Image: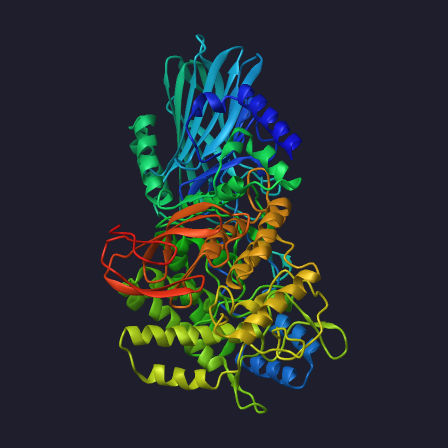
């Protein structure tokens, strides 16, 4: 151990002496990612974003590359209809299942109801290149991302002259802004160029110059390699957009030349970039010009101040520490490699936690689209899984941190999108299934909010519970914020529509006399049918019934808060009373995933859908000991057979461990998450990149430290042993209670609670459980025994 320590000290001293980060941040603890070299590929580049507009920064000293992003860059439109199949087809499908002809049912459900494979992808917004016309030796290179201020910086020296580049994606000014400075007497010589990748060899943009200092990039998102129903379906229309760029300088010259801007002899330059699309604005070109004029009227210092203040209003709410940050003197990629080599880095764990908050603030703001599979950052014309919205965990996981990490406003894009989805889901329910009440949402959707089924396999596409899972977010938003207006006008109407669909979808099981949901699938998984071959469709499945039960319970709870007692609530109570249970234990003590104890072809499947009731649901708790034990056994079985291999699945596992008070497994899964699933820029790798794992990790960390799903607060319920000291502040519990926790030697030292309203709250730490009184806006400070320290 002494040799290791001396080696680390030597590495640290060498690093301190050789990088420019120290010169910039000496004596200041900065929450940042930083590197000693430019990014060689996209998964090393650093992200900035304002919720809608963003970029990935490579930091190349020769040709700087900013890959551009915007959240509404989609081809096509709401043109594929709302349904496929009929109520008669549904009757025939159920008959096949009743007869045990599940393989025929698998084929039938796809043939009759699915649009099969669809390629209609979120796309890159293009590329910005800065071609530096210089020669010389580059030294003291630094590339970093300040998470506190949301500023990316690239700096280095060329033959002793300093160069500094700063990039921000401002929400308050709705622009990407780049500041460039040099100490070289002759200034900087560089060209500015905008471009966008071809779509199947066809140009996608036209770049022109305007005046002497502007570039304009006009285009339309197309998908010439588009696919619908497994057939080529070229999409030559889509969202139109305009990107406008203006450069200003101190000293030197700017000259337009053949679609580029040539800057010569410049000591300082500021580049302003805006993008507007037809999705948001009918007059998007006029809006782009207006936006550019407004932002370019401000200095970079003023824009930076406004941006940092706006970003800090969200980011500064929470602070998390696990002790020493001594390893900050090592570049992030080297720290990550040490971790992958077996040297646990607790401070890097806190940085990844903060990075999740940074990414959510940067990819989801009021008035934007929700964060997709890649947030907003996507360099493809045809992205993996279309970089769209998967409703069987991925979109929801993106928003798991929003409530607990005190970022409730960032969930608004999810609700705006879900409300659009609800309207199309009503049409799908009527046209496809003959259900006149409520709405249905299947497994996958995109910018245009289709609710129909598309997949060539029944294992994922035929799942019907996207709306049911989204309903949980509406109810939890109320539970965390206590916003009665939101409950009445948004949450309850959404939950009611989903419940209405379920009430008419359910069928009475002649054998049990219970209401059963079918056809059902368990997301992306299969079971072995009687003939030993894999099948997907079943008569009931655990996750489906768990979600239906939760929707019914939450809708009734919301109705109670709103003093609603009508025909709907009476019918709902009756259906709920006779609903097939979603938590059934098999003879081996595990929770059944389907209606029967089938064998599984993939015993270590990445989805643990039948544990929805454990997390993010709340039906399985310590108060249900048999189910609690069965959940643990279910997880153990999956992991014994190689489960949780993907990034988001490992992140979900951390929350499962937290709910089961399994701190040892949580510690192990955090370590595996870093060792297997994290890229150099700390993006989660599925692989390839999916951002949900980043968000799931951040939410899981809080779940280890605070839980409030049981109608009381659990403090440090699953604190990992190696988190022996630490603190977290500003996190949220249900009931709109802000919580701060400090601990040492794995024991609570101080707990703070504050509520905007006077109320009582029950708190549990270890074996101590007390009911406490909170006065509006007055922090209550408690000791290890949950006794007040406020007046001490």
Q: How is the image coloured?
A: rainbow
Kindly indicate the quadrant of the structure image that contains residue 290.
Answer: top left
Q: Position of residue 146 (x, y in %)?
A: 44, 34
Name of the residue lying farthest toward the right: 531
Measured along the vertical axis of the image, is residue 144 above or below residue 592? above
Would residue 541 be visible to someone looking at this image? yes
Identify which residue is drawn at 39% across, 83% down: 573
Q: Is residue 576 above or below residue 112?
A: below
Nearest to the observer: residue 484 or residue 170: 484
**Is the residue 614 above or below the residue 180 in the image?**
below
Residue 737 in percent (x, y) is at: 32, 57
Q: Is residue 160 left or right of residue 213?
A: right
**Image height check: is 161 above or below 20?**
above
Residue extending farthest to the top is 185
Rendered image quadrant of residue 54: top left
In front here: 436 or 496? 496
Q: Indicate the quadrant containing the N terminus: top left, top right, bottom left or bottom right.
A: top right
Q: Can residue 234 be seen by looking at this rendering?
A: no
Q: How many marks?
A: 0
Q: Nearer the viewer, residue 319 or 487?
A: 319
Looking at the picture, how far across and down is residue 574, in whole percent?
Answer: 41, 86
Residue 605 falls left or right of residue 44: right
Residue in the picture at 66% in, 77% down: 105
Image coords of residue 384 (percent x, y): 60, 50
């Amino acid at each position: 151990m002494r040799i290791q320590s001396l080696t680390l000290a030597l590495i640290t001293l060498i690093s301190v002496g050789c990088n420019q980060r120290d010169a910039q941040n000496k004596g200041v603890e900065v929450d940042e990612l930083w590197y000693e070299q430019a990014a060689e590929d996209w998964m090393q580049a650093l992200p900035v974003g304002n919720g809608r507009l963003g970029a990935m920064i490579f930091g190349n000293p020769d040709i700087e590359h900013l890959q551009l992003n915007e959240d509404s860059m989609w081809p096509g439109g709401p043109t594929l209809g709302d349904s496929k199949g009929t109520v008669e087809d549904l009757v025939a499908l159920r008959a096949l299942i009743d007869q045990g002809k599940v393989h025929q049912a698998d084929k039938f459900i796809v043939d009759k109801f699915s649009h099969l494979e669809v390629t209609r992808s979120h796309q890159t917004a293009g590329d910005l290149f800065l071609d530096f016309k210089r020669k010389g030796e580059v030294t003291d290179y630094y590339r970093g991302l300040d998470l506190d201020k949301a500023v990316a910086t690239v700096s280095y020296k060329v033959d002793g002259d300093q160069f500094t580049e700063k990039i921000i994606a401002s929400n308050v000014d709705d622009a990407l802004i780049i500041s460039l400075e040099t100490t070289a007497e002759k200034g900087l010589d560089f060209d500015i160029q905008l471009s966008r990748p071809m779509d199947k060899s066809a140009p996608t943009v036209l770049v022109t110059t305007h005046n002497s200092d502007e570039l304009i990039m006009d285009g339309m998102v197309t998908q010439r390699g588009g696919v619908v129903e497994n057939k080529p379906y070229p999409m030559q229309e889509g969202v139109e957009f305009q990107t406008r760029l203006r450069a200003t300088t101190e000293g030197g010259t700017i000259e337009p030349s053949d679609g580029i801007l040539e800057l010569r002899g410049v000591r300082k330059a500021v580049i302003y970039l805006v993008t507007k699309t037809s999705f948001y604005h009918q007059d998007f070109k006029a809006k782009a010009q207006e936006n550019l004029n407004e932002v370019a009227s401000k200095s970079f210092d003023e824009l930076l101040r406004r941006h940092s203040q706006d970003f800090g209003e969200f980011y500064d709410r929470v602070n998390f520490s696990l002790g020493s940050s001594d390893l900050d003197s090592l570049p992030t990629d080297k720290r990550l490699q040490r971790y992958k080599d077996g040297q646990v880095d607790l401070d890097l764990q806190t940085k990844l936690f903060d990075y999740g908050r940074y990414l959510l603030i940067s990819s989801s703001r009021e008035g934007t689209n929700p964060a997709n599979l890649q947030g907003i950052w996507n360099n493809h014309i045809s992205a993996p899984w279309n970089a769209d919205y998967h409703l069987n965990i991925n979109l929801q996981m993106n928003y798991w941190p929003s409530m607990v990490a005190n970022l409730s406003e960032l969930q608004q894009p999810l609700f705006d999108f879900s409300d659009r989805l609800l309207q199309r889901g009503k049409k799908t329910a009527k046209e496809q299934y003959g259900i006149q009440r409520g709405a249905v949402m299947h497994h996958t959707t995109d910018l245009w909010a289709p609710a129909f089924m598309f997949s060539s396999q029944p294992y994922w596409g035929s799942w019907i519970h996207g709306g049911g899972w989204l309903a949980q977010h509406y109810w939890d938003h109320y539970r965390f914020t206590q916003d009665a207006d939101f409950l009445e006008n948004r949450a309850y109407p959404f939950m009611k529509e989903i419940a209405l669909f379920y009430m008419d979808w359910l069928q009475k099981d002649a054998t049990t006399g219970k209401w059963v949901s079918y056809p059902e699938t368990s997301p992306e998984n299969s079971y072995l049918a009687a003939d030993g071959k894999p099948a997907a469709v079943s008569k009931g499945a655990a996750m489906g019934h768990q979600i239906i039960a939760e929707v019914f319970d939450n809708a009734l709870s919301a109705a109670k808060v709103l003093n609603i007692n009508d025909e709907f609530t009476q019918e709902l109570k009756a259906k709920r009373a006779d609903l097939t249970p979603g938590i059934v234990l098999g003879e081996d003590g595990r929770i059944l995933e389907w209606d029967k104890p089938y064998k599984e072809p993939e015993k270590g499947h990445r989805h643990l859908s039948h544990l929805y009731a454990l997390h993010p649901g709340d039906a399985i708790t310590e108060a249900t000991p048999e189910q609690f034990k069965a959940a643990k056994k279910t997880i153990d079985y999956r992991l014994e057979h190689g489960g949780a291999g993907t990034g988001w699945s490992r992140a979900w596992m951390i929350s499962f461990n937290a709910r089961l008070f399994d701190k040892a497994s949580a510690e192990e899964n955090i370590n595996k998450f870093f060792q297997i699933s994290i890229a150099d820029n700390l993006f989660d790798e599925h692989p390839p990149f999916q951002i949900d794992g980043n968000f799931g990790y951040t939410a899981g960390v809080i779940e280890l430290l605070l839980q409030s799903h049981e109608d009381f607060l659990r403090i440090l319920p699953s604190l990992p042993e190696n988190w022996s000291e630490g603190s977290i502040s500003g996190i949220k519990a249900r009931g709109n209670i802000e919580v701060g926790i400090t601990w040492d030697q794995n024991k609570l030292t101080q707990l703070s609670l504050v509520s905007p309203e006077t109320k009582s709250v029950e708190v549990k730490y270890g074996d101590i459980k007390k009911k406490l009184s909170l006065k509006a806006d007055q922090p209550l400070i408690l000791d290890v025994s949950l006794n007040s320290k406020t007046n001490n």
